[in-house]
Image: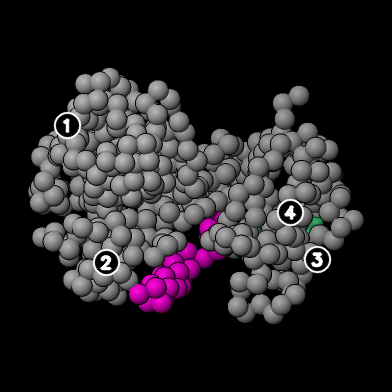
Protein backbone atom coordinates (compact mmCIF):
# COMPACT_ATOMS: atom_id res chain seq x y z
CA UNK A 1 0.00 0.00 0.00
CA UNK A 2 1.18 3.42 -0.84
CA UNK A 3 0.71 6.94 0.51
CA UNK A 4 2.39 10.04 -0.81
CA UNK A 5 2.56 13.41 0.91
CA UNK A 6 3.51 16.50 -1.07
CA UNK A 7 4.11 20.07 -0.04
CA UNK A 8 4.79 23.24 -2.00
CA UNK A 9 5.80 25.15 1.13
CA UNK A 10 9.11 26.98 0.54
CA UNK A 11 11.61 25.48 0.97
CA UNK A 12 9.62 22.33 0.29
CA UNK A 13 12.43 20.09 1.54
CA UNK A 14 11.55 21.30 5.06
CA UNK A 15 9.14 18.36 4.90
CA UNK A 16 12.16 16.20 5.64
CA UNK A 17 12.73 18.04 8.93
CA UNK A 18 9.10 17.78 9.98
CA UNK A 19 8.96 14.07 9.20
CA UNK A 20 12.48 13.49 10.50
CA UNK A 21 13.29 11.56 7.35
CA UNK A 22 16.08 12.79 5.14
CA UNK A 23 14.86 13.45 1.56
CA UNK A 24 18.23 12.33 0.20
CA UNK A 25 17.91 8.81 1.54
CA UNK A 26 15.60 5.85 1.13
CA UNK A 27 14.97 4.11 4.43
CA UNK A 28 13.26 0.88 5.45
CA UNK A 29 11.67 -0.01 8.75
CA UNK A 30 10.65 -3.36 10.15
CA UNK A 31 7.10 -3.54 11.40
CA UNK A 32 5.65 -6.52 13.19
CA UNK A 33 3.51 -7.29 10.14
CA UNK A 34 5.94 -6.39 7.34
CA UNK A 35 8.12 -3.56 6.18
CA UNK A 36 7.75 0.16 5.56
CA UNK A 37 9.87 2.06 3.07
CA UNK A 38 10.19 5.84 3.06
CA UNK A 39 11.64 7.66 0.08
CA UNK A 40 11.23 10.94 -1.75
CA UNK A 41 10.39 10.72 -5.47
CA UNK A 42 10.88 14.49 -5.68
CA UNK A 43 12.69 16.90 -3.39
CA UNK A 44 13.28 20.42 -4.66
CA UNK A 45 12.89 23.88 -3.13
CA UNK A 46 9.50 24.21 -4.83
CA UNK A 47 8.01 20.79 -4.34
CA UNK A 48 8.78 17.84 -2.14
CA UNK A 49 7.01 14.47 -2.01
CA UNK A 50 7.48 11.77 0.56
CA UNK A 51 6.31 8.26 -0.33
CA UNK A 52 5.46 5.66 2.31
CA UNK A 53 5.28 2.17 0.89
CA UNK A 54 4.09 -0.52 3.27
CA UNK A 55 4.57 -4.20 2.52
CA UNK A 56 2.43 -6.56 4.52
CA UNK A 57 3.88 -9.97 5.21
CA UNK A 58 1.13 -12.64 5.24
CA UNK A 59 2.97 -14.78 7.76
CA UNK A 60 3.20 -11.79 10.05
CA UNK A 61 -0.52 -11.22 9.63
CA UNK A 62 -1.51 -14.61 10.86
CA UNK A 63 1.13 -14.60 13.53
CA UNK A 64 -0.05 -11.45 15.14
CA UNK A 65 -3.72 -12.09 14.37
CA UNK A 66 -3.99 -8.86 12.49
CA UNK A 67 -5.64 -10.45 9.52
CA UNK A 68 -9.02 -9.30 8.32
CA UNK A 69 -11.85 -10.39 10.54
CA UNK A 70 -14.20 -11.42 7.78
CA UNK A 71 -16.31 -14.52 7.60
CA UNK A 72 -14.03 -16.35 5.21
CA UNK A 73 -12.01 -18.08 7.91
CA UNK A 74 -8.51 -19.18 6.98
CA UNK A 75 -8.87 -18.33 3.32
CA UNK A 76 -9.45 -14.72 4.27
CA UNK A 77 -6.15 -14.70 6.06
CA UNK A 78 -4.24 -15.50 2.90
CA UNK A 79 -6.29 -14.07 0.10
CA UNK A 80 -7.24 -10.52 0.96
CA UNK A 81 -6.71 -6.91 0.04
CA UNK A 82 -4.51 -6.08 3.03
CA UNK A 83 -1.23 -5.83 1.14
CA UNK A 84 -2.70 -3.30 -1.29
CA UNK A 85 -5.45 -1.26 0.28
CA UNK A 86 -4.86 1.53 2.74
CA UNK A 87 -6.05 0.20 6.09
CA UNK A 88 -5.26 0.14 9.76
CA UNK A 89 -1.88 -1.34 8.81
CA UNK A 90 -1.06 1.95 7.17
CA UNK A 91 -2.04 3.72 10.38
CA UNK A 92 0.25 1.55 12.43
CA UNK A 93 3.05 2.17 9.93
CA UNK A 94 2.43 5.93 10.13
CA UNK A 95 2.65 5.85 13.90
CA UNK A 96 5.75 3.65 13.90
CA UNK A 97 7.66 5.50 11.23
CA UNK A 98 6.55 9.06 12.02
CA UNK A 99 6.10 8.78 15.77
CA UNK A 100 7.88 12.03 16.55
CA UNK A 101 6.23 13.94 13.72
CA UNK A 102 2.83 12.81 15.03
CA UNK A 103 3.52 14.58 18.31
CA UNK A 104 4.19 17.85 16.46
CA UNK A 105 7.79 18.07 17.63
CA UNK A 106 10.38 19.20 15.15
CA UNK A 107 13.80 19.12 16.74
CA UNK A 108 15.81 20.93 14.11
CA UNK A 109 13.26 23.65 13.39
CA UNK A 110 10.89 23.83 16.38
CA UNK A 111 8.43 26.28 14.82
CA UNK A 112 8.04 24.19 11.70
CA UNK A 113 6.24 21.42 13.59
CA UNK A 114 3.27 23.66 14.30
CA UNK A 115 3.33 25.59 11.05
CA UNK A 116 0.35 25.18 8.72
CA UNK A 117 1.75 24.34 5.30
CA UNK A 118 0.06 23.33 2.04
CA UNK A 119 -0.19 19.55 1.96
CA UNK A 120 -1.47 17.09 -0.59
CA UNK A 121 -1.97 13.41 0.20
CA UNK A 122 -2.54 10.77 -2.42
CA UNK A 123 -3.85 7.32 -1.63
CA UNK A 124 -4.08 5.18 -4.75
CA UNK A 125 -6.31 2.54 -3.16
CA UNK A 126 -8.39 3.61 -0.20
CA UNK A 127 -11.34 1.40 0.69
CA UNK A 128 -14.30 3.71 1.36
CA UNK A 129 -17.09 1.68 2.90
CA UNK A 130 -19.94 4.11 2.84
CA UNK A 131 -18.82 5.59 -0.47
CA UNK A 132 -17.15 8.86 -1.28
CA UNK A 133 -19.98 10.71 0.41
CA UNK A 134 -18.81 9.36 3.75
CA UNK A 135 -15.23 10.15 2.80
CA UNK A 136 -16.23 13.79 2.30
CA UNK A 137 -18.16 13.88 5.55
CA UNK A 138 -15.01 12.79 7.34
CA UNK A 139 -12.46 15.08 5.76
CA UNK A 140 -14.32 18.20 4.67
CA UNK A 141 -15.17 19.34 8.22
CA UNK A 142 -11.43 19.23 8.93
CA UNK A 143 -10.73 21.65 6.11
CA UNK A 144 -9.73 19.29 3.30
CA UNK A 145 -10.50 19.54 -0.38
CA UNK A 146 -11.43 15.99 -1.37
CA UNK A 147 -11.02 14.36 -4.74
CA UNK A 148 -12.11 10.74 -5.12
CA UNK A 149 -12.28 8.48 -8.13
CA UNK A 150 -13.96 5.17 -7.67
CA UNK A 151 -11.92 2.27 -9.05
CA UNK A 152 -13.43 -0.51 -11.15
CA UNK A 153 -13.22 -4.05 -9.79
CA UNK A 154 -11.20 -5.01 -12.84
CA UNK A 155 -10.22 -2.60 -15.58
CA UNK A 156 -10.25 -5.45 -18.07
CA UNK A 157 -13.86 -6.39 -17.20
CA UNK A 158 -15.87 -3.16 -16.91
CA UNK A 159 -19.11 -5.18 -16.76
CA UNK A 160 -18.13 -6.27 -13.22
CA UNK A 161 -18.78 -2.73 -12.07
CA UNK A 162 -17.06 -0.67 -9.41
CA UNK A 163 -15.18 -1.66 -6.28
CA UNK A 164 -15.35 0.10 -2.94
CA UNK A 165 -11.78 1.33 -3.45
CA UNK A 166 -11.08 4.90 -4.40
CA UNK A 167 -8.10 6.80 -5.62
CA UNK A 168 -8.16 9.68 -3.21
CA UNK A 169 -6.46 13.06 -3.12
CA UNK A 170 -6.75 15.23 -0.01
CA UNK A 171 -5.51 18.80 0.12
CA UNK A 172 -5.33 21.15 3.07
CA UNK A 173 -3.13 23.73 4.70
CA UNK A 174 -2.32 22.34 8.10
CA UNK A 175 0.53 21.43 10.45
CA UNK A 176 1.83 18.04 9.35
CA UNK A 177 1.11 16.39 12.71
CA UNK A 178 -2.57 17.25 12.40
CA UNK A 179 -2.76 15.69 8.98
CA UNK A 180 -0.99 12.58 10.25
CA UNK A 181 -3.45 12.23 13.16
CA UNK A 182 -6.40 12.63 10.82
CA UNK A 183 -5.08 9.89 8.57
CA UNK A 184 -4.16 7.68 11.50
CA UNK A 185 -7.73 7.65 12.77
CA UNK A 186 -9.76 8.03 9.59
CA UNK A 187 -8.12 5.50 7.26
CA UNK A 188 -9.23 2.51 9.36
CA UNK A 189 -12.59 4.20 9.89
CA UNK A 190 -13.12 4.35 6.14
CA UNK A 191 -12.00 0.78 5.73
CA UNK A 192 -14.31 -0.24 8.56
CA UNK A 193 -12.27 -3.37 9.03
CA UNK A 194 -9.77 -2.20 11.55
CA UNK A 195 -7.71 -5.15 12.69
CA UNK A 196 -9.39 -5.91 15.96
CA UNK A 197 -6.47 -7.40 17.77
CA UNK A 198 -5.82 -4.69 20.28
CA UNK A 199 -2.41 -4.69 21.88
CA UNK A 200 -2.71 -1.28 23.44
CA UNK A 201 -5.77 0.42 24.64
CA UNK A 202 -7.68 1.46 21.57
CA UNK A 203 -9.90 3.93 23.37
CA UNK A 204 -7.02 5.97 24.67
CA UNK A 205 -5.31 5.75 21.29
CA UNK A 206 -8.40 7.18 19.65
CA UNK A 207 -8.61 9.95 22.21
CA UNK A 208 -4.94 10.78 21.96
CA UNK A 209 -4.86 10.88 18.17
CA UNK A 210 -8.20 12.63 18.06
CA UNK A 211 -7.07 15.35 20.44
CA UNK A 212 -8.05 18.79 19.31
CA UNK A 213 -10.37 17.73 16.49
CA UNK A 214 -12.48 14.70 17.26
CA UNK A 215 -14.65 16.25 19.96
CA UNK A 216 -15.96 18.86 17.57
CA UNK A 217 -16.25 16.57 14.56
CA UNK A 218 -19.87 16.19 13.36
CA UNK A 219 -19.24 12.51 12.61
CA UNK A 220 -17.55 11.74 15.90
CA UNK A 221 -20.03 9.00 16.79
CA UNK A 222 -19.61 7.18 13.51
CA UNK A 223 -15.85 7.60 13.82
CA UNK A 224 -15.73 6.14 17.32
CA UNK A 225 -18.08 3.32 16.34
CA UNK A 226 -16.05 2.21 13.36
CA UNK A 227 -12.67 2.85 14.95
CA UNK A 228 -13.56 0.66 17.89
CA UNK A 229 -14.98 -2.04 15.67
CA UNK A 230 -18.54 -1.50 16.87
CA UNK A 231 -17.72 -2.80 20.35
CA UNK A 232 -20.50 -1.04 22.13
CA UNK A 233 -18.87 -0.85 25.55
CA UNK A 234 -15.78 0.76 24.14
CA UNK A 235 -17.70 3.17 21.95
CA UNK A 236 -19.78 4.56 24.80
CA UNK A 237 -16.63 4.78 26.85
CA UNK A 238 -14.91 6.77 24.16
CA UNK A 239 -17.88 9.03 23.53
CA UNK A 240 -18.30 9.80 27.20
CA UNK A 241 -14.66 10.77 27.39
CA UNK A 242 -14.80 12.72 24.18
CA UNK A 243 -17.57 14.82 25.57
CA UNK A 244 -15.56 15.71 28.65
CA UNK A 245 -12.42 15.66 26.52
CA UNK A 246 -10.31 14.64 29.45
CA UNK A 247 -7.56 12.14 29.93
CA UNK A 248 -8.81 8.58 30.19
CA UNK A 249 -8.68 6.86 33.56
CA UNK A 250 -5.77 4.39 33.41
CA UNK A 251 -7.52 1.75 35.58
CA UNK A 252 -10.53 1.81 33.36
CA UNK A 253 -8.31 1.59 30.30
CA UNK A 254 -6.57 -1.48 31.74
CA UNK A 255 -9.93 -3.09 32.41
CA UNK A 256 -11.11 -2.40 28.91
CA UNK A 257 -7.92 -3.85 27.56
CA UNK A 258 -8.24 -7.01 29.62
CA UNK A 259 -11.80 -7.49 28.42
CA UNK A 260 -10.69 -7.06 24.86
CA UNK A 261 -7.91 -9.55 25.22
CA UNK A 262 -10.22 -12.17 26.63
CA UNK A 263 -12.49 -11.50 23.71
CA UNK A 264 -9.71 -11.93 21.23
CA UNK A 265 -8.48 -15.15 22.83
CA UNK A 266 -11.94 -16.56 22.38
CA UNK A 267 -11.97 -15.43 18.79
CA UNK A 268 -9.04 -17.48 17.61
CA UNK A 269 -7.49 -20.28 19.64
CA UNK A 270 -3.75 -20.73 19.96
CA UNK A 271 -4.07 -24.00 18.13
CA UNK A 272 -5.69 -22.36 15.12
CA UNK A 273 -3.07 -19.66 15.13
CA UNK A 274 -0.32 -22.21 15.21
CA UNK A 275 -1.78 -24.06 12.25
CA UNK A 276 -2.33 -20.81 10.39
CA UNK A 277 1.25 -19.74 10.97
CA UNK A 278 2.69 -23.09 9.95
CA UNK A 279 0.52 -23.15 6.85
CA UNK A 280 1.58 -19.64 5.95
CA UNK A 281 5.24 -20.56 6.38
CA UNK A 282 4.84 -23.60 4.11
CA UNK A 283 3.03 -21.54 1.53
CA UNK A 284 5.54 -18.74 1.90
CA UNK A 285 8.45 -20.93 0.82
CA UNK A 286 6.46 -22.09 -2.20
CA UNK A 287 6.36 -25.74 -1.16
CA UNK A 288 4.19 -28.05 -3.26
CA UNK A 289 5.16 -31.35 -1.61
CA UNK A 290 4.93 -31.45 2.17
CA UNK A 291 5.32 -33.81 5.09
CA UNK A 292 3.45 -33.54 8.34
CA UNK A 293 5.71 -35.37 10.76
CA UNK A 294 3.82 -36.47 13.88
CA UNK A 295 0.60 -35.45 12.20
CA UNK A 296 -1.58 -36.56 15.13
CA UNK A 297 -5.28 -36.25 14.45
CA UNK A 298 -4.69 -34.54 11.13
CA UNK A 299 -5.73 -30.94 11.73
CA UNK A 300 -2.87 -29.60 9.65
CA UNK A 301 -3.38 -32.32 7.03
CA UNK A 302 -6.90 -31.09 6.52
CA UNK A 303 -5.75 -27.52 5.96
CA UNK A 304 -3.02 -28.66 3.60
CA UNK A 305 -5.48 -30.79 1.68
CA UNK A 306 -7.83 -27.84 1.18
CA UNK A 307 -5.06 -25.80 -0.39
CA UNK A 308 -4.42 -26.55 -4.05
CA UNK A 309 -0.84 -25.30 -3.80
CA UNK A 310 0.05 -28.60 -2.15
CA UNK A 311 0.21 -31.35 -4.74
CA UNK A 312 1.70 -34.09 -2.59
CA UNK A 313 0.98 -34.39 1.11
CA UNK A 314 2.16 -37.09 3.49
CA UNK A 315 1.20 -37.33 7.14
CA UNK A 316 3.07 -39.71 9.37
CA UNK A 317 2.62 -40.66 12.99
CA UNK A 318 3.75 -43.45 15.25
CA UNK A 319 0.31 -43.90 16.81
CA UNK A 320 -2.29 -46.01 15.02
CA UNK A 321 -5.03 -44.60 17.11
CA UNK A 322 -4.45 -40.98 16.17
CA UNK A 323 -4.08 -41.95 12.53
CA UNK A 324 -7.54 -43.50 12.65
CA UNK A 325 -8.84 -40.24 13.99
CA UNK A 326 -7.03 -38.39 11.22
CA UNK A 327 -8.58 -40.66 8.60
CA UNK A 328 -12.02 -40.04 10.11
CA UNK A 329 -11.53 -36.32 10.18
CA UNK A 330 -10.52 -36.32 6.52
CA UNK A 331 -13.22 -38.82 5.45
CA UNK A 332 -10.34 -40.71 3.97
CA UNK A 333 -12.54 -43.73 3.22
CA UNK A 334 -14.37 -41.68 0.63
CA UNK A 335 -11.21 -40.56 -1.14
CA UNK A 336 -10.72 -41.56 -4.77
CA UNK A 337 -7.46 -43.19 -5.83
CA UNK A 338 -6.22 -39.87 -7.17
CA UNK A 339 -7.03 -38.15 -3.89
CA UNK A 340 -5.21 -40.89 -2.02
CA UNK A 341 -2.23 -40.31 -4.27
CA UNK A 342 -2.29 -36.64 -3.34
CA UNK A 343 -2.62 -37.23 0.40
CA UNK A 344 -1.11 -40.25 2.10
CA UNK A 345 -1.32 -41.22 5.74
CA UNK A 346 1.54 -43.39 6.91
CA UNK A 347 2.27 -45.13 10.13
CA UNK A 348 5.91 -44.88 11.09
CA UNK A 349 8.38 -43.54 13.55
CA UNK A 350 10.59 -40.53 13.19
CA UNK A 351 13.29 -42.45 15.04
CA UNK A 352 14.24 -44.35 11.92
CA UNK A 353 15.44 -43.56 8.47
CA UNK A 354 12.42 -43.86 6.19
CA UNK A 355 12.80 -43.68 2.41
CA UNK A 356 9.12 -42.71 2.05
CA UNK A 357 9.98 -39.33 3.55
CA UNK A 358 12.67 -38.37 1.06
CA UNK A 359 12.34 -35.83 -1.73
CA UNK A 360 9.86 -33.33 -0.23
CA UNK A 361 9.94 -29.55 -0.48
CA UNK A 362 9.00 -29.03 3.14
CA UNK A 363 8.11 -30.68 6.42
CA UNK A 364 6.07 -29.52 9.38
CA UNK A 365 6.89 -30.82 12.86
CA UNK A 366 4.19 -29.28 14.97
CA UNK A 367 4.35 -29.80 18.72
CA UNK A 368 6.20 -33.08 18.39
CA UNK A 369 9.80 -32.70 19.55
CA UNK A 370 8.83 -32.12 23.17
CA UNK A 371 7.36 -35.65 23.16
CA UNK A 372 10.76 -37.18 22.44
CA UNK A 373 13.21 -37.85 25.21
CA UNK A 374 16.74 -36.64 24.62
CA UNK A 375 18.42 -39.75 23.13
CA UNK A 376 15.47 -40.13 20.77
CA UNK A 377 15.62 -36.48 19.85
CA UNK A 378 19.10 -37.12 18.45
CA UNK A 379 17.70 -39.94 16.29
CA UNK A 380 14.88 -37.69 15.13
CA UNK A 381 17.41 -35.01 14.12
CA UNK A 382 19.20 -37.43 11.83
CA UNK A 383 16.13 -39.02 10.32
CA UNK A 384 14.64 -35.63 9.45
CA UNK A 385 17.59 -33.36 8.69
CA UNK A 386 20.09 -35.91 7.40
CA UNK A 387 17.97 -38.52 5.60
CA UNK A 388 14.55 -37.10 4.71
CA UNK A 389 16.26 -33.73 4.18
CA UNK A 390 13.36 -31.53 3.01
CA UNK A 391 14.15 -28.06 1.66
CA UNK A 392 12.32 -26.44 4.55
CA UNK A 393 11.49 -27.75 8.00
CA UNK A 394 9.03 -25.85 10.18
CA UNK A 395 9.27 -26.84 13.85
CA UNK A 396 7.04 -25.60 16.65
CA UNK A 397 7.29 -26.30 20.36
CA UNK A 398 5.97 -24.67 23.54
CA UNK A 399 7.87 -21.75 25.01
CA UNK A 400 8.29 -22.71 28.67
CA UNK A 401 8.81 -19.10 29.73
CA UNK A 402 5.22 -18.37 28.79
CA UNK A 403 3.83 -20.98 31.19
CA UNK A 404 3.61 -18.46 34.03
CA UNK A 405 0.92 -16.74 31.98
CA UNK A 406 -1.42 -19.73 31.88
CA UNK A 407 -3.57 -19.28 34.92
CA UNK A 408 -4.67 -22.88 35.03
CA UNK A 409 -1.16 -24.32 34.91
CA UNK A 410 0.42 -25.02 38.32
CA UNK A 411 3.96 -23.64 38.57
CA UNK A 412 6.66 -25.97 37.31
CA UNK A 413 4.26 -28.24 35.42
CA UNK A 414 4.37 -28.99 31.73
CA UNK A 415 1.42 -28.25 29.51
CA UNK A 416 0.90 -31.87 28.64
CA UNK A 417 1.57 -35.01 30.67
CA UNK A 418 3.48 -36.63 27.83
CA UNK A 419 5.93 -33.78 27.38
CA UNK A 420 9.50 -34.80 28.09
CA UNK A 421 10.72 -31.22 28.20
CA UNK A 422 9.59 -27.70 27.46
CA UNK A 423 12.20 -25.29 26.31
CA UNK A 424 12.83 -21.62 26.96
CA UNK A 425 13.43 -19.49 23.88
CA UNK A 426 17.19 -19.67 24.44
CA UNK A 427 17.14 -23.44 24.73
CA UNK A 428 15.08 -23.90 21.57
CA UNK A 429 17.20 -21.46 19.64
CA UNK A 430 20.43 -23.08 20.81
CA UNK A 431 19.16 -26.52 19.77
CA UNK A 432 17.95 -25.17 16.43
CA UNK A 433 21.25 -23.50 15.68
CA UNK A 434 23.18 -26.61 16.56
CA UNK A 435 20.98 -28.72 14.28
CA UNK A 436 21.29 -26.19 11.46
CA UNK A 437 25.06 -26.10 11.73
CA UNK A 438 25.39 -29.82 11.81
CA UNK A 439 23.09 -30.60 8.89
CA UNK A 440 23.64 -27.60 6.63
CA UNK A 441 20.49 -25.55 7.23
CA UNK A 442 19.85 -21.96 8.23
CA UNK A 443 17.18 -21.13 10.76
CA UNK A 444 15.00 -18.18 11.66
CA UNK A 445 12.49 -17.87 14.46
CA UNK A 446 8.95 -16.60 14.76
CA UNK A 447 6.70 -16.27 17.80
CA UNK A 448 3.22 -17.76 17.57
CA UNK A 449 0.35 -16.36 19.60
CA UNK A 450 0.13 -13.17 21.62
CA UNK A 451 3.62 -12.00 22.43
CA UNK A 452 4.35 -10.95 25.97
CA UNK A 453 7.09 -8.35 26.42
CA UNK A 454 8.70 -10.34 29.19
CA UNK A 455 8.14 -14.02 28.46
CA UNK A 456 7.53 -14.04 24.70
CA UNK A 457 4.79 -15.91 22.87
CA UNK A 458 3.19 -19.19 24.02
CA UNK A 459 4.55 -21.12 21.05
CA UNK A 460 7.90 -20.80 19.36
CA UNK A 461 8.58 -21.67 15.77
CA UNK A 462 11.80 -22.27 13.86
CA UNK A 463 11.94 -22.24 10.07
CA UNK A 464 14.92 -24.25 8.85
CA UNK A 465 16.00 -23.89 5.25
CA UNK A 466 18.45 -26.20 3.57
CA UNK A 467 21.59 -24.43 2.40
CA UNK A 468 22.38 -24.85 -1.24
CA UNK A 469 25.51 -26.95 -1.51
N1 LIG B 1 1.22 -32.30 15.02
C1 LIG B 1 -0.02 -32.64 15.68
C2 LIG B 1 0.15 -33.59 16.88
C3 LIG B 1 1.07 -33.13 17.97
S1 LIG B 1 1.08 -34.25 19.33
C4 LIG B 1 -0.76 -31.38 16.10
O1 LIG B 1 -0.29 -30.28 15.99
O2 LIG B 1 -1.88 -31.50 16.57
C5 LIG B 1 2.56 -35.16 19.03
C6 LIG B 1 2.41 -36.29 18.04
O3 LIG B 1 3.68 -36.85 17.78
C7 LIG B 1 1.50 -37.42 18.54
O4 LIG B 1 0.49 -37.66 17.61
C8 LIG B 1 2.48 -38.58 18.65
O5 LIG B 1 1.84 -39.82 18.34
C9 LIG B 1 3.53 -38.23 17.64
N2 LIG B 1 4.81 -38.87 17.88
C10 LIG B 1 5.47 -39.01 19.04
N3 LIG B 1 6.61 -39.70 18.85
C11 LIG B 1 6.69 -40.00 17.53
C12 LIG B 1 7.62 -40.71 16.73
N4 LIG B 1 8.71 -41.25 17.25
N5 LIG B 1 7.38 -40.82 15.43
C13 LIG B 1 6.26 -40.29 14.88
N6 LIG B 1 5.34 -39.61 15.59
C14 LIG B 1 5.55 -39.48 16.91
**Which one is nearer the viewer's eye here, 411 or 82?**
411
124 over 182 or under it: above or below: above
Residue 101's x, y, as percent? 34, 44
Q: Residue 420 carries which label?
A: 3
Quarter location, residue 179: top left
Tag 1 near tag 4, CB within 8 Å: no
The quadrant of the picture occupied by the C terminus is top right
Q: Which mark is residue 426?
A: 4
Q: In this view, does 416 lie to the left or right of 387?
A: left
Q: What residue is rendered at 37% in x and 40% in y?
A: 107
- The stretch of residues the image draws in magenta is 249-276
Mark 1 neighbour density, 10 Å: few (under 14) some (14–19) many (20 or more): few
Q: How far apart are marks 1 and 4 (CA)?
A: 55 Å
Q: Is the magenta stretch mostly helix, strand or loop?
A: helix
Helix, strand or loop at mark 4: helix
**Which one is nearer the viewer's eye here, 323 or 383?**
383
First along the sequence among labels 2 and 3: 2
Check disc 2 and report the residue beneath it.
230
Q: How far apart are marks 2 and 4 (CA)?
A: 41 Å
Camera-nearest label, 2 or 1: 2
Amino acid sequence: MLLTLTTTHRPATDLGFVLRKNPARAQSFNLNFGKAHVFYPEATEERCTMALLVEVDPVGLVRTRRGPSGEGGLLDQYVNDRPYAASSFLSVALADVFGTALTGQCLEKPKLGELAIPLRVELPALPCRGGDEFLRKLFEPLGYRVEAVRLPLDEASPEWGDSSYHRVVLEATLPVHQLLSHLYVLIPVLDNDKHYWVGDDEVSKLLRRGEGWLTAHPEREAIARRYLKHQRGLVSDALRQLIVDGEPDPDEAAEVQAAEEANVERGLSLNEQRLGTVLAALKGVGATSVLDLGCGEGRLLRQLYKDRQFKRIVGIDVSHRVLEMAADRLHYDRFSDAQKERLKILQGSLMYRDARLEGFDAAAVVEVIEHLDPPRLAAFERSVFEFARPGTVVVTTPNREYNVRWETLPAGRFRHRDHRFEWSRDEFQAWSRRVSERFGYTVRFLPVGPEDAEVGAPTQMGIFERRVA
